[in-house]
Amino acid sequence: MFCTNITLKVKNSYLMIEKYLCQFYYIWANNNNMKRFSILPLIAIFIFSLISYENLQAQSLELIGDSYVSGNPGIPIASHIIVKNTTSASIDVRCQKNIIDTAAGTQNYFCWGINCWPSSTYVSPIPDGVRTIPAGYADTNNFTGYYDAAFSGVPSQACAVVEYCFYPVGNISDSTCLTVQYNACTSSIFENEKKIFLGDFYPNPTENLTRINYVADNNSYLQIVDILGNKIQSFDLDNSGVLEISTTDFSSGIYFGNLISDSRVVSVKKIIIN
């Protein structure tokens, strides 16, 4: 809210400057005596205000990731977020976790920097919880968020909603956030997802061929996307089995396999192509 208020104030000031500049120009253009004075300083002020406003609107970081993930209720569910530096300079980035909703007997934690941080940690500490991202670079494999619904020892279909925010060290007002929902909160979705499963890619990394185990329903398919979210290839799935994928035509890099059921992403797996 604080940052929003600043933005609104600057925007209103910018509009006011624009209004008065237009009024002054009208008077100046229709008054021969005032034409002795240069209007260039006022134009310079207007341009400076416009540039300042545009800079304030820009964010230094861009996030790419799924807003919904689910998986085997007996093991922690993982969420992967790509953090991209959109500026022309390196940025030291911290991560902040905001729990919007969760269930008793469960826990969530995240990995960022050089360590994974326990459920009691909400902001990645300095220096170990800081990641330096070069200018224009997308950090594709450093962040992982986890939700452990079986923390109490009993597998559960409990759900949680967690917001992850990333920002340059010392400038939390330049935060970029992504909200992730782990599992869903309606029993009908739970019953459907108990029948759906997506294993890990193997071999991974790979060069020419990879495989993945799955259990799916009639409305499921596997979609391969690159780190920018571009759709590369899709495979219809039915019942259960092992999907074999040729990667000879893939460029080297990081890709994600999204298991989609009833138009929703229910599981995400990462694969590296050498």
Image (cartoon, rainbow, N blue to C red):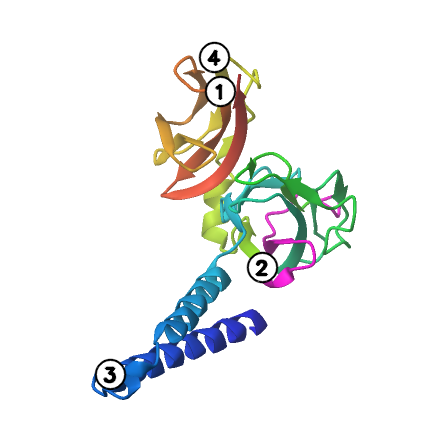
- Asked if residue 162 is among those painted magenta in the image, a careful observer would answer yes
The image shows residue 86, relative to residue 236, as above or below, that is below
Tell which of 238 and 254 is nearer to you.
Answer: 254
Which numbered dot is residue 26?
3
The secondary element bearing badge 2 is classed as helix
Instruction: Specify whether residue 116 is in view.
Output: yes
Callout 2 amino acid: Asp
In front here: 2 or 54?
54
Residue at 58% from the left image edge and 73% from the top image edge = 2
Residue 147 covered by magenta stretch: no
The x and y percentages for residue 145 are 64, 44
Q: Return the mark for residue 252.
A: 1
Q: Is residue 16 above or below residue 95?
A: below
Q: Quadrant of residue 221?
A: top left
Q: Which mark is residue 174?
A: 2
Q: Which mark is residue 209?
A: 4
- Say which residue appears at 61% left-offset and 34% top-offset: 141
Q: CA distance from mark 1 to mark 2?
A: 32 Å
Callout 1 amino acid: Ser
**Of discs 2 and 3, which sits in the foreground?**
3
Q: Earlier in the sequence, mark 1 or mark 3?
A: 3
Q: Please, is residue 114 above or below residue 232 in the view?
A: below
The boundaries of the magenta stretch are: 151-174
The numbered mark, 1 or 2, whose residue comes first in the sequence reads 2
Q: Nearer the viewer, mark 1 or mark 2?
A: 2
- Residue type highlighted by circle 4: Leu
Residue 102 shows in the view: no
- The local crowd at label 1, few if under 14, some if 14 to 19, many if 20 or more residues have their Cα within 10 Å, is few
* SS state under label 3: helix
Question: What's the distance in space between the residues labelled 4 and 3, CA to CA?
Answer: 70 Å
Q: Are marks 1 and 2 in contact (CB under 8 Å)?
A: no
CB atoms of marks 4 and 1 within 8 Å? no
